[in-house]
Image (cartoon, rainbow, N blue to C red):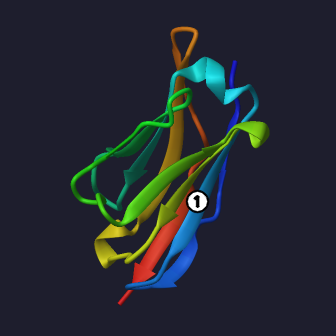
Amino acid sequence: QVQLVESGGGLVQAGGSLRLSCAASRSIFVMNNMNWFRQAPGKQREWVATIATLSGTTNYADSVKGRFTLSRDNAKNMVNLQMNSLKREDTAVYYCQVRYDGSDYWGQGTRVTVSS
């Protein structure tokens, strides 16, 4: 099993920045990829970004490309999502997700609210 704990959410004005973190209970190297999703009020959960834990290769949804940056901290078994130039439409609960040993694991989510 894997436990994931997100942190760093909060209220920020449009144009501002936040840094989300996801701490894993196991070495992130065994998980291949770590992902961030988000779910806005009244909408379906959507994929935001992925980092390959070994290579550090990242991929981003078009809606966040150029504004969000995903990185990993191997020593802390953690991935960080730096979010800059935030927009109102980035308001959502952000979730960290991994697939490990054939099962999907999700964190509890951290809420991001962007005000105009």
- Residue at 50 percent across and 77 percent down: it is 17
Going by the image, does 83 lie left or right of 72? left
In which quadrant will I find the C terminus? bottom left
- Judged from the image, the secondary structure of the residue bearing numbered disc 1 is strand
Q: Is residue 34 above or below residue 14?
A: above
- Where residue 25 sits: x, y (%)? 76, 31
- Residue at 58 percent across and 73 percent down: it is 10
- Where residue 89 sits: x, y (%)? 29, 71
Amino acid type for the residue under numbered disc 1: Leu
Q: Residue furthest front?
A: 55
Name the residue tied to disc 1: 20
- Where residue 56 sits: x, y (%)? 50, 36
- Residue at 38 percent across and 75 percent down: it is 86
How packed is label 1: few (under 14 Cα within 10 Å), some, or many (20 or more)?
many
From the viewer's side, name the closer residue of 17 and 74.
74
Q: Is residue 11 above or below residue 3?
A: below
Q: Quadrant location of residue 77?
A: top right
